[in-house]
Image (cartoon, coloured by chain):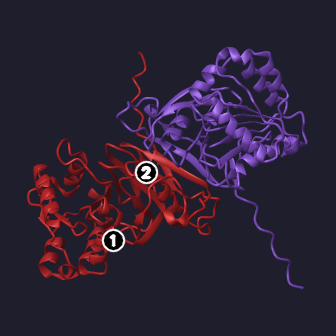
Chain colours: A purple, B red
Amino acid sequence: LPSENLPDARGPLIAIGGAEDKQKEKRVLWQLVRLAGHTEARIVVLPTASTVPEHLAELYVRVFQELGAPKPEVLHVYERADASDPGVLARLEAATLVFMTGGDQLRLVAKLGGTPVSSMIRKMNARGVPVAGTSAGAAALCQHMIGRGRSGQVLGRHMVELAPGLGLTNRLIIDQHFSQRHRMGRLFSAVALNPFLVGVGIDEDTAACIGPDNRLTVWGRGSVTVVDGHHLSYTNVHEVDGRTPAAVLGMSSHVLTAGCAFDLVDHAAYGPPPPPRPPPPE
Amino acid sequence: LPSENLPDARGPLIAIGGAEDKQKEKRVLWQLVRLAGHTEARIVVLPTASTVPEHLAELYVRVFQELGAPKPEVLHVYERADASDPGVLARLEAATLVFMTGGDQLRLVAKLGGTPVSSMIRKMNARGVPVAGTSAGAAALCQHMIGRGRSGQVLGRHMVELAPGLGLTNRLIIDQHFSQRHRMGRLFSAVALNPFLVGVGIDEDTAACIGPDNRLTVWGRGSVTVVDGHHLSYTNVHEVDGRTPAAVLGMSSHVLTAGCAFDLVDHAAYGPPPPPRPPPPE
């Protein structure tokens, strides 16, 4: 990754669609350990989104250790006051990767928003430290976060409730458990509400990695759906009521799998590199 | 509709997404009666797709009568031999609109394909007679028909089984009960298999009317999703197995509601006409 050569660049953001494999190949979590520095890794696990945070944090600590990270640590942030604790901040500052678990993204942001922990995570990412989240932890990475929503393909304002997220990126809006929970309608609706945002719908056991060069790449078993309103020509999503479906014309979509990429600056999608050609016969 | 002024042009095709209102406003079925000539209408109902054809045909005859069509007739085609019956063919030939009910599109095509009835329907449409179908009857309008498939957003060859349809259009591939049965994945997959086809996913109680000018317009309560692979830049749908999701880059989608249109020649989507501006102050 470019960030490994450019220590001054912003660090990667890794958004995981939830339910990543923790028992077999662990492909997605292995990429996090690699990014964190493998045997030099200092991963901190932030389980604030969860209602069973201790349990969930211990699970991830064990898996990261199995993958070779020497001493993953848990940040015990359960109430807002914990997010100013000097011991917590010292452990956070030493991390080579921050990992936010699943749970409820509204809980995560209500506990963390505006605290020294939240501010430090943003600063660490700005100076090159990777920040990762799964499920709720992925949703909360964005400035504009999907807080709640409905399943299905129908479009409309009523399909999605937006809330302010942790603000590590303002270009994207992330949705998770995407194919598994039929969330095309709510992501289309969120992007139609402000087509500046690029919608990123991430399947389970799959990750979107946004590099310092603003190139999105895909890891894992499923697909990442990019919903791009850059050329959107018409929508009435702002004016229809909850009983009437909204119209959206000119949306581009790209369904990316491992090896594909999307450039967030150029709005261009790329397939995997072609296999090398055989040498010409002599 | 242009066909009303251009008697030599091909007739409209009307694809209904199933479950159209038969009791309250009956907006979609009213449009059929209007197209058929209202009090001059001679509608024939073809219930071959259904396993309860008599029952279903009687229901539509009653509703078309309630809407002012004087004498809707049932074409009793239940076996292939019925589709060569001179009495059936004479009643069909006199029709001002052909309506095919729901049921199973594979049944419909297996009974009708290659028969004089099927051939006459194509010829009648070519000389201006509107042909309409709901649910299975809509799917079967196309040259390439979705015979079976799976629900969900995932892409892949295994999501969709294609079969040869009645061939009234070769530009489109139609899917029905679209939002209600979560059929985005199978329509994307069908279009990715040959991006010449424009995918048209029609919600329940909603219709896509393809005019003689190859302009698709929308009637009814829901939306019609157009999936256009005209600018598709990459897919591996042909080579991935059933356990691996396929990638598709550069798909355009348009979610149209009543008043919107899609031009099948230019691949351009249009919103409803803007409301008239108030006159300038004097």
**Where does residue B214 sit, x and y in percent of width and height?**
41, 59
**Label 1: which secondary element:** helix
Q: Pick whichever of labels 1 and 2 is earlier in the sequence.
A: 1
Residue B167 is left or right of residue B111, and the answer is right
Q: Chain of mark 2?
A: B
The residue that disc 2 covers is B182
Farthest residue toward the left? Answer: B70
Q: Is residue B194 left or right of residue A31?
A: left
Mark 1, residue position: B106
Q: Nearer the viewer, residue A175 or B65?
A: A175
Residue A206 rendering spot, x and y as whole percentages:
65, 49
CA gap between label 1 and label 2 equals: 20 Å
Name the side, left or right, on which A89 lies relative to A101.
Answer: right
Rendering quarter of residue B244: bottom right
Q: Amino acid at mark 1?
A: Leu
Q: Amino acid at mark 2?
A: His
Residue extending farthest bottom: A282
Residue at 32% across, 67% down: B105
Q: Nearer the viewer, residue A223 or A38?
A: A38
Does A199 appear above or below B231? above
- Quadrant of the snapshot with the C terminus of chain A: bottom right
The spot of residue A188 in percent (x, y) is 52, 41
Q: Is residue A189 visible?
A: yes
**Does residue B42 show up?**
no
Q: Secondary structure under badge 2?
A: loop
